Image: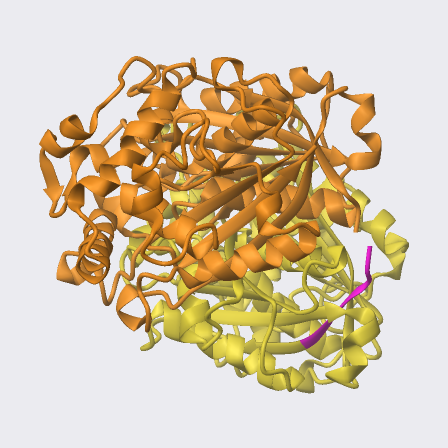
Chain colours: A yellow, B orange
């Protein structure tokens, strides 16, 4: 298996409504990533997207974006894991390069959520036969987890607000963030309207449009393209029981645990080697649960450390360093590629005002549905 | 890169309406493939499906099927290339095993097309902005190709009927075929109702339900599981200009050519080494064009060889040996996995009345949309 490096990235600002169509946004970041690496042609393009079937009536987007980017002829496939689809595209690009099948592969994610209401298609990440008929949605499932957590660990509702406050603070210096001009306070989070009790509006990542891409090559060839390559040290996927109701310990995200364990072994590092964690904070409770499942915090303690500032840029484990899903935005299929871009910027000292001091290793976790699927990627320099 | 073998297969009969739900049918063939190899656990499950978003309101099927099959915890992702999605799942399983990331991976395809009318979701394989608003569908695009072909090569309309006649004849001895009891004649094809001129009903593969799976392991470990392994010698993908209107030579399927060339190089064989060809005969014209693009027949000659019986079980290049998409059926996301199962049966001498004499190498091509994406797989013993 060949070692893999990222040598080019591309991203456009996350916005409520982007003018360009799906193919145009996707092709734009593909060309950006290629220009960043100074490469004219790639062997493969893997696309992450969740909602285009319903929102853009498009079920063949990898080939479509490849054509729009002037890459007709190239290998192009779409990979999905519901809300973790961007990470799934990254994994396939990793496998293609690691295996030797491709000497260059782009993982591209694109999502336009504002074309029509995405709530119903988003709920299709759940069990259509056994959950959705009960009125369950991704929001209500996260609300259930938050309530269970508060009950079990006596966590105050305000505790979760700190994840949102931190994310918004970090977005202020990210030009690609949706909420690049909007700091929030705990009081504001608590005063925001109730969406699905106990979840309030500011616990939720926003509906938005975006696209991002990363270009992967064999590590041994990385210096041909850049003097700032980032190694993709590990890629893994794990699943849990599909329905939360079937899980013996719903507050322990088993898929996160399993994929984390596999990724650490593959990367040959320890948990404490990780400099920062781009966590899947689609909801504040999810950030808390992932920090616990990944082993950084004992179960039931994530909220305490958030209140203590442990996850800020100057904390012991910075998370959502460029705004996270909450404040950079969560254009679903593009999200993990945005995070990949941000990780590359951090690891190569280009994160501007949000730059961490000499980070060496970054963790990315991506959650599909109600954590029925979790992907873990580890990056290093 | 590790060599890869198939050591287990699973398939259920293709039917107009299957009673089981998507997850149940998918899990059934997963367990079948595992039982066939005598294996209790796999590292990964890759799912092929095209229509579940609309027809079953389900966007997270890989994890769902893994759970139903008792494989909770396992890696599970969905891969798509519109109507070639089953082949995309096969490719991802190949990459996972070839790269060393997985020591066992299942490629599973499942599709239930009869739950509600699939015509609109199927058209999403085309360009939603530039083709579908003109009323174009997969059928009308194939009709356009057939008319162009007839005009350019002075091919009689009847010529294409021979592909359907051959497919139905071969389905008669396949217990999993939808049309296992229905031979057709050229006259019957020509008398069937017009769907989109010049395409008639019997030029088209049917709407149906099905599921099939294949279990892949490193070739060096294959003998642990079976004494009849089949090597997956090559896997490749290529794209064309997305819209037929943008192609300089619409009757030359460039994606088929390109992926065929890549696959032959990877397999280290010549075209004439191929014993039989499981062709993507979603429409009779598509079988003809693929035979030409893959280089078995000069452009404009496919129909002549079909009339001469060259593609029958006793012909020089047998195709659709178990009924093809036309008569076994084309449950979209499952189709390439059905073909994989059939290829394994042929290559290991288990194809019953349709058994070819000592086939050594098989070709599979899978067409996404109007051949904007084509996947090629080559198998051998």
Left or right of A261? Residue A185 is: left
- In the displayed structure, B353 sits above or below B217; it is above
Give the quadrant of residue B284: top left
At x 65% / y 68%, what residue is drawn? Answer: A340
Left or right of B380? Residue A45 is: left
Give the quadrant of residue B331: top left
Q: Position of residue A133 (x, y in %)?
A: 34, 28
Query: In this view of the protein, which residue sits in the foreground, A11 or A76?
Result: A76
Residue B110 is covered by the magenta coloring: no
Residue span colored magenta:
A1-7
At x 40% / y 61%, what residue is drawn? Answer: A207
Q: Position of residue B348 (x, y in %)?
A: 65, 22
Question: Which residue appears farthest toward the front when viewing the image?
Answer: B308
Q: Does any portion of residue A155 appear in the rendered image?
A: no
Q: Does any portion of residue A248 appear in the rendered image?
A: yes
Could you tell me which quadrant the C terminus of chain B lies in?
A: top right
Q: Position of residue B154 (x, y in %)?
A: 19, 56
At x 51% / y 56%, what residue is drawn? Answer: A77
Q: Position of residue A63 (x, y in %)?
A: 43, 62
Residue A4 is covered by the magenta coloring: yes
């Amino acid at each position: 298996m060949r070692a893999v490096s990222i040598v080019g990235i591309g991203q456009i600002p996350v916005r409520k409504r982007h003018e360009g169509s799906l193919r145009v946004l996707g092709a734009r970041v593909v060309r950006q990533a290629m220009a960043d690496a100074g490469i004219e042609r790639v062997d493969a393009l893997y696309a992450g997207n969740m909602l285009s079937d319903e929102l853009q009536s498009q079920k063949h987007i990898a080939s479509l974006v490849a054509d729009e980017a002037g890459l007709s002829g190239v290998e192009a496939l779409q990979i999905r894991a519901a809300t973790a689809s961007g990470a799934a595209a990254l994994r396939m690009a990793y496998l293609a390069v690691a295996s030797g099948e491709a000497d260059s592969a782009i993982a591209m994610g694109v999502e336009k959520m504002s074309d029509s209401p995405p709530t119903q298609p988003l709920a299709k990440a759940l069990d259509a036969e056994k959950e959705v008929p009960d009125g369950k949605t991704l929001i209500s499932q996260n609300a259930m987890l938050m309530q269970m957590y508060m009950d079990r660990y006596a966590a105050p509702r305000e505790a979760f607000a700190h994840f949102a406050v931190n994310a918004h603070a970090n977005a202020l210096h990210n030009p690609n963030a949706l909420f690049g001009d909007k700091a929030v306070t705990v009081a504001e989070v608590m005063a925001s309207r109730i969406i699905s009790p106990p979840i309030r509006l500011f616990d939720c990542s926003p509906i938005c449009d975006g696209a991002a891409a990363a270009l992967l090559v064999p590590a041994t060839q990385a210096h041909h393209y850049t003097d700032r390559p980032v190694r993709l040290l590990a890629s893994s996927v794990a699943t849990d029981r599909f329905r939360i109701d079937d899980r013996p310990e719903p507050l322990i995200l088993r898929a996160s645990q399993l994929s984390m364990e596999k990724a650490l072994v593959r990367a040959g590092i320890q948990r404490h080697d990780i400099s920062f964690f781009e966590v899947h904070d689609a909801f504040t409770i999810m950030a808390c649960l992932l920090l616990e499942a990944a082993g950084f915090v004992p179960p039931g303690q994530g909220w305490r450390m958030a209140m203590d500032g442990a996850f800020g840029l100057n904390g012991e484990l910075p998370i959502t360093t460029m705004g996270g899903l909450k404040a950079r935005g969560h254009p679903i299929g593009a999200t993990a590629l945005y995070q990949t871009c941000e990780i590359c910027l951090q690891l190569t000292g280009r994160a501007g005002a949000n730059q961490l001091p000499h980070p060496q290793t970054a963790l990315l976790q991506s959650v599909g549905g109600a954590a029925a699927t979790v992907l873990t990627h580890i990056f290093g320099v």
